[in-house]
């Protein structure tokens, strides 16, 4: 190859290199945009309080004898911003003290029959009627022992069994036309009254010494607790066409695995409390 041709190729290569460098300097324009987002969580807040005409809501009594019964009515309020689906009951006990004769904690707890009833909260005190019983069969009552050891399931009406087979004090079964009052919604305003009666069994059975078999429970005492757990509905699906606003979590009949409410309620400054049942994700 001649020197002339070598120089020519070098010049060509240099020119190509300058062309590439020059091409990069043309990308001097650009633009940016930001999508501003904001998430705010709601609150799930169960408040347990007295009814209008009731005294204490707890059971704290001594000097009891067989045949005594104690009634309490308390109110379940939704003090949060998210509808409560269920109010699940878990009963625990401790600090058992055996009295004058030998007995066990389980035996002592089995002496107390518990009647749970859902009360019509729209009916004023002191009537509180009608009352819907939780117990399936009065001839097969629930005892404190059943509640503590979990053996009550077969004794409870199915509609009052919630997640984990726990007793649900805010049942999802309601009268036709009142679906919006399942559980404890925020909108419409609602509360559930719960009636509980605990009765010390009166067993006339005697042993071979003509002594009442319940004598062994004299002087016994125990602490027990009704632990309440409020749960939420399933997550609501907010689809692309839905406007911005608050997710419709205040109402009952919210997402339950098969239905979905209108997901946005406050985009126009008004609250849409209607529930539209649609297939989730559609």
Image (cartoon, rainbow, N blue to C red):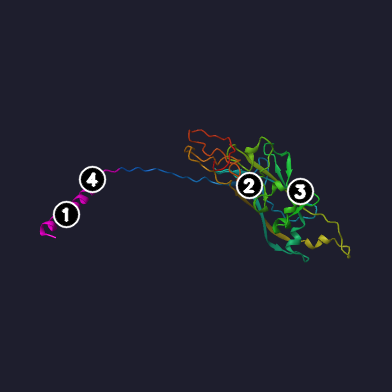
In primary-sequence order, the first of circles 2 and 1 is: 1
> Which residue, given by chain and number where applicable, does mark 3 sit on?
136
Q: How crowded is mark 2: few (under 14 residues within 10 Å), some or many (20 or more)?
A: many
Q: Residue at x 73, y 41 (%)?
A: 131
Instruction: Give the distance between the C-alpha atoms of the residues marked 2 and 3, in whole angstroms.
Output: 19 Å
Q: How crowded is mark 1: few (under 14 residues within 10 Å), some or many (20 or more)?
A: few
What is the quadrant of the C terminus in the image?
Answer: top right
> Which residue, given by chain and number where applicable, does mark 4 sit on?
26
Q: Which residue is drawn at 16% across and 54% down?
A: 14
> Which residue, given by chain and number where applicable, does mark 2 sit on?
86
In primary-sequence order, the first of circles 3 and 4 is: 4
Indicate which disc residue 150 carries: none
Instruction: Give the distance between the C-alpha atoms of the residues marked 2 and 1, in whole angstroms.
Output: 78 Å
Pick the residue in front: 221 or 198: 198
Q: Quadrant of residue 212?
A: bottom right
Q: Give the range drawn in magenta.
A: 1-30
Magenta region, main secondary structure: helix
Instruction: Give the distance between the C-alpha atoms of the residues marked 1 and 3, in whole angstroms.
Output: 95 Å
State whether residue 132 is above or below residue 149. Answer: above
Pick the residue in front: 280 or 38: 280
Pick the residue in front: 80 or 271: 271
Left or right: where 161 falls relative to 25: right
- The mark closer to the camera, 4 or 1, is 1
Left or right: where 48 falls relative to 197: left
In primary-sequence order, the first of circles 2 and 3 is: 2
In primary-sequence order, the first of circles 1 and 3 is: 1
Do the numbered discs 1 and 3 sit on residues whose CB atoms are within 8 Å? no
* Residue 120 place in picture, x, y as percent: 69, 39
Q: Is residue 16 magenta?
A: yes
Instruction: Give the distance between the C-alpha atoms of the residues marked 3 and 4, in whole angstroms.
Output: 82 Å
User: Residue extending furthest bottom?
Assistant: 102
């Amino acid at each position: 190859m001649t020197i002339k041709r070598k120089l020519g190729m070098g010049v060509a290569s240099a020119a190509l290199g300058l062309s590439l460098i020059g091409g990069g300097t043309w990308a001097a324009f650009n633009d940016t945009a930001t999508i501003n987002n904001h998430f705010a969580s709601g609150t799930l807040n169960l408040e347990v309080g007295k009814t209008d005409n009731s005294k204490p809501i707890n059971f704290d009594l001594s000097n009891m004898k067989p045949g005594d019964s104690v009634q309490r009515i308390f109110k379940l309020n939704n003090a949060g911003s998210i509808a409560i689906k269920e109010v699940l009951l878990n009963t625990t006990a401790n600090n058992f003290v055996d009295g004058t004769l030998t007995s066990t904690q389980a035996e002592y707890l089995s002496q107390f029959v518990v009647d749970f009833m859902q009360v019509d909260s729209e009916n004023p005190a002191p009537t509180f009627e009608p009352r819907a019983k939780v117990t399936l069969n009065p001839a097969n009552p629930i005892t404190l022992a059943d509640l503590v050891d979990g053996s009550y399931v077969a004794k409870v009406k199915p509609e009052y069994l919630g997640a984990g087979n726990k007793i649900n004090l805010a049942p999802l079964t309601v009268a036709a036309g009142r679906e919006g009052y399942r559980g404890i919604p925020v909108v419409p305003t609602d509360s559930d009254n719960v009636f509980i009666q605990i009765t010390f069994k009166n067993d006339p059975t005697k042993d071979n010494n003509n002594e009442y078999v319940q004598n062994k429970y004299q002087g016994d005492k125990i602490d027990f607790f009704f632990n309440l757990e409020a749960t939420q509905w399933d997550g609501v699906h907010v689809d692309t066409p839905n406007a911005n606003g608050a997710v419709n979590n205040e109402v009952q009949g919210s997402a339950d695995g098969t239905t979905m409410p209108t997901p946005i309620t406050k985009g126009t400054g008004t609250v849409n409390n209607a529930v539209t049942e649609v297939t989730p994700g559609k």
